[in-house]
Image (cartoon, grey):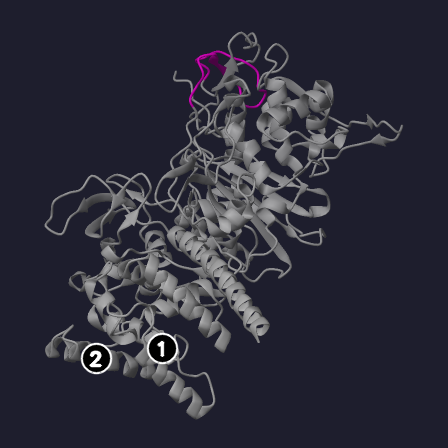
Amino acid sequence: MRKTILILMLGLAGAAIVFFVCAFRADTQVRERFQGRVWELPAKVYARPLQLYPGMALVPDLFEEELKFLGYRRETFAKDLKDPGRYCRTGDTFDLFCRAFDFGDEARPARRTRIIIQKGQVTALTLPDGREREDERLDPVFLGGFYPGSMEDRVLVTLAGIPDLLGKTIVAVEDRNFYAHHGIDLKSIFRAIFVDLKTRSFSQGGSTLTQQLAKNFFLSREKSLIRKINELFVAGILERRFTKDEILEAYLNEVYLGQDGNRAIHGFGLAADFYFGKSLDRLGPGEIALLVGMLKGPSFYNPRQSPDRAKARRNLVLELMKEQDLISPALMEKARSAPLNVVPKPAPGHHSPFSYYLDLIKRQLLKEYREADLRTMGLRIFTALDPQVQVAAEQGTAGFMKNRDKNLEAGVVVTSRTSNEIQAVVGGKAFRAGGFNRALDVRRPIGSLVKPAVYLTALAQPDRYTVVTPVSDGPLTVKLADNRTWQPKNYDRQYHGTIPLYQALVHSFNVSTVRLGMDLGLVRVADTLGKLGQAPEKPYLPSMLLGSVDMSPIQVAQVYHTLASGGFYTPARAILAVYTPEGSPLRRYPLTVTQTVDPAPVFLMNKLLQAVVARGTGKNLEQWLAPGMGIAGKTGTSSDLRDSWFAGFSGSRLAVVWIGRDDNTSCGLTGATGALQVFGRVMSRIPNIPLNPAVPESIEWGAVTPDTGQLTRDDCPTAYAMPFIKGSKPPETGSCRAVPGKPNSGHFFDWLKKVFR
């Protein structure tokens, strides 16, 4: 008997030790995790915040498109703007109730402002009382996020930052004795057990707020006795280690309140925005009642899918709020008679409205961050995407693609000419579908887009070549390394004899380009391409001179940006800054500029590219853009019309367009009949300033006769000024012939600086 008692006592002692060890470990784990509140917060990606100021160019329709992407709701009258996220448009005047937003470098509260636009320009920013403002900064368009494996999303809030009515209503509805019990409400538990035994199920909860938090934050949703025991155990630890306010605040952020596609809506902070398009602090009693009522069953009481059921539940909660003296009878009646005020369902939050651009952002981020960190650290990422430029790029592409071969595809990249910030990316004609990103991944022969590198290589040697150096466009045979021969042909199948160098580029003659490139040497041309930003792969073949080099649209944009910036290489940027959830800057992406090419030959090249548009293969741009814009650009067409290219820039923006087929068969379009037309449609939709390249000090001008390209007298009535690098201007050789009865009409190069007689 004694032996049995001893064994029993030892067993009980062992069990007690195991219990206390487990309790200690559980206590430590719960305390450490709860103190850290380590929720998996997705990285949030935003477009550039729109900075408005008097004098800036702004297209009213594109501005309204951006407001729609922001989720701003249009009201009929300005007096109806009672909440942030609303706007009223009267003609080209916009009244906005701007949302509060923390931009990282500053936080702006919710406020009202009026934006007056006249003739495509902001003329005034005013407050409701009529006082003028220097600037306005709108909250940026949300592009998407990188979500954790659980697909949970939340906006963290503090108890101090929520309406007092919300906290009191949650307690009144979910756990009236919350501030009296120690995590467990025995009366509720016994009542639930009685019902469960009677119905032979585990349908009744009887859970306190602390138990609900324990279940959601630490345990599974499984309905079992073991889980219930664990829930009580964890709830006890929470109550012993933390205050009631800390527990309630965690509950506010953890509770599940609905589904957005695959994204789970957690916490009242995100739910307020998801259902009402508001921040939590701006919810009224009826809206608070609706969200609290949904705690009983977010799917069952979903106000978008079951509005009548949700309204009945809301009204029941309002009755309870009145009974608990949280609201007055009059306020209850007013809230009961009000509509639900739920905003139209937004696009699923895990899908970006600009998925191709988000793809670019993810690729760049993964070079610096682990994917697990992007999905859990709650980073806020601000990008260079300009929603108005993006919409214009999509509309321009769609306008060209309408009623065309369904197999045609497109890739478009638009950047800032000054900073090389990537403002828009079109990866395919199905803009919202995502998938294969042609702007980044389609690598095709660039055709004549390579020619500026050939001519730039020549112009960088002013002792040998100038813009008027004679080049031969006669028949040419090139001996290849394997003893075969190659005879390049011009697109028009004609030869054009001896012509000035500028004419060879302006009209994109193949034969004279190959002859010039072979004279320069393939290595030098390849070196120039490298300095521009994209060196070709070895071995270097003569066909490289006509664009057998494979590039993607984004790579071409980098090459042409170095030209557009005057010979300064600036790496393309899509990410501007990264912030922690607390608002501290984690990483900034400053502008870096390196001069890789002498500005003087680049200036000459840009003048020639302006001539391509004014009088050469890019002349059709005049359908969309006025000649006074001075657009510089180049068409490109690969063999058998497989690829149609155009790259060009204004004084403010650069765009590259590719048109082709995914199966690499002929698209039947040249650069001029395909990509150029998309470029024109895109650039005509957005504000642009004329291109007027700065003239380097080493440039001088000489009068040239347009028919021969020879230097002549400055007072010649038919002469035009041509740029030369100092010391390279040839001696005067051309004759000056006046045309009787015909004024100096500028019939050849409108883009050249005319010599005044």
Of 274 and 585, which appears nearest the observer?
585
Q: Position of residue 611 (x, y in %)?
A: 52, 30
Please give the residue where the numbered disc 2 appears in the rendered image: 320
- Element at label 2: helix
Q: Quadrant of residue 192?
A: bottom left
The quadrant of the picture occupied by the N terminus is bottom right
Q: Residue at x 22, y 49 (%)?
A: 109
Q: Which mark is residue 296?
A: 1
Q: Quadrant of the C terminus?
A: top left
- What number is the disc on residue 91? none
Displayed quadrant of residue 104: top left
Q: Helix, strand or loop at disc 1? A: helix
Q: Is residue 451 magenta?
A: no
Q: Amino acid at mark 1?
A: Lys
- Whole-percent x and y of residue 552? 62, 42
Residue 634 seen in the current view = no
Badge 2 density bin: few <14, some 14–19, many ≥20, Cα 10 Å = some
Magenta stretch bounds: 694-716
Relative horizontal placement of residue 253, taking residue 676 as reference (left or right): left
Residue drawn where x is 28% and y is 83% of the image: 312
Where residue 278 sits in the image (x, y, percent)? 28, 61
Q: Residue furthest front?
A: 2
Residue extending furthest toward the bottom: 198
Is 707 part of what is drawn in magenta?
yes
Which label's residue is closer to the chain start, 2 or 1? 1
Which one is nearer the viewer's eye here, 649 or 701? Answer: 649
- Above or below for 228 versus 73: below
Residue drawn at (41%, 70%) of the image? 232
- In this view of the protein, which residue sits in the foreground, 19 or 466? 19
> Residue, x 11% and y 48% (percent of image)?
130
- Whether residue 228 can be seen here: yes
The kind of residue on which mark 2 rests is: Leu
